[in-house]
Amino acid sequence: MLYRYASLLCLFIAFATSRCSQSADARTAFKSPDGYDLNKPFLLKLPVELDEISGLAFYSHDTSVFAIGDEFGYLYKIPLTKGKPIRKWKFSNQGDYEDLVMVDKVFYVLQSNGNITAFTFDDHNQILSQQKEFPATGNEFEILYFNHHIFKLVLMCKDCETDKKKALSVIYFNLLNKQFDDSASINVTAIANMVGEKKIKFKPSAAALHPITDELYIISSINKLVVVCDKNGNPKQAYPIDPVLFKQPEGITFTPQGDMIISNEAAGRGVANLLFFKYNKNVKP
């Protein structure tokens, strides 16, 4: 098992297009969280069908990534090793799908209105699904991640009626009773101060807990930021990101060894891609 993850970078390099073709030396170097260099990813181009990729979940069994698209209700399995095809399954009808979480053998897909579709595969590889409707309207979500400490899914607002200018709403979905329950918030004022602003309209697009540091990584495509928080969502540091590399980041996932994978939608510039960042805990950019 350890060998599998140690060799994942080599496998990805062999399969990927290679490091980003536009050298970081020719652009402004951006600061990175400890353990990463966000200026030099390995890049994997994706087929046109995945131009609106949204939501990622790393699958350790065979070093692949599960993903969804924005509209058509398909689950994709993208291998990170050379020579294997991308597979897909229909889990629902058309909708506005934003994020994906895998807990044990169950997939959870978030719609922009807060509804969650849960599905799994039976012994005949057929999908069994059910939907839980969010109990309020007028909200917009893009983020769903799993907090294993409390065994709950976490929905993070992009634009919710209860939001205030200084905070961003967070809602929990309890996996034990399959109910929405407690709420919390992200301190947006703290994030603004970290980037030298008095206030910002923070609109996050992806988030995941780091498997080693237990920190919460939040990406905002609109704000072009990576925000690192503690596991409870308290902001610790914010990092502006290169808009050339991160043209429209909509998904994030980690390998058990801390390697970070971020998905970019095509955004009208070429095709969608995966950005792979190797984790080295001894590196402090």
Image: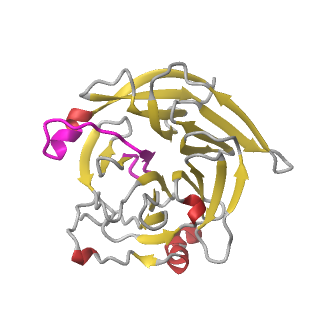
Residue 192 part of the magenta segment = yes
Asked whether residue 211 is in view, the answer is no
Q: Nearer the viewer, residue 112 or 281?
A: 112
Q: Quadrant of the N terminus?
A: bottom right
Residue 70 percent location from the top left of the image: 55, 47
> In this image, 191 relative to 220: left or right?
left
Asked whether residue 200 is in view, the answer is yes
Q: Nearer the viewer, residue 211 or 19?
A: 19
Residue displayed at 65% across by 59% down: 77
Residue displayed at 23% across by 61% down: 31
Q: Residue furthest front?
A: 268
The dominant secondary structure in magenta is: loop
When the figure is inspected, residue 141 is found, relative to residue 56, above or below; the finding is above
Residue displayed at 51% across by 35% down: 112
Q: How is the image coloured?
A: secondary structure
Residue 155 part of the magenta segment = no
> In this image, 93 relative to 99: left or right?
right
Residue 154 percent location from the top left of the image: 48, 34
Residue displayed at 38% across by 74% down: 20
Residue 202 quadrant: top left
Residue 246 percent location from the top left of the image: 36, 60
Q: Residue furthest right?
A: 124
Q: Magenta residues, as a range?
A: 191-217
Residue 81 quadrant: bottom right
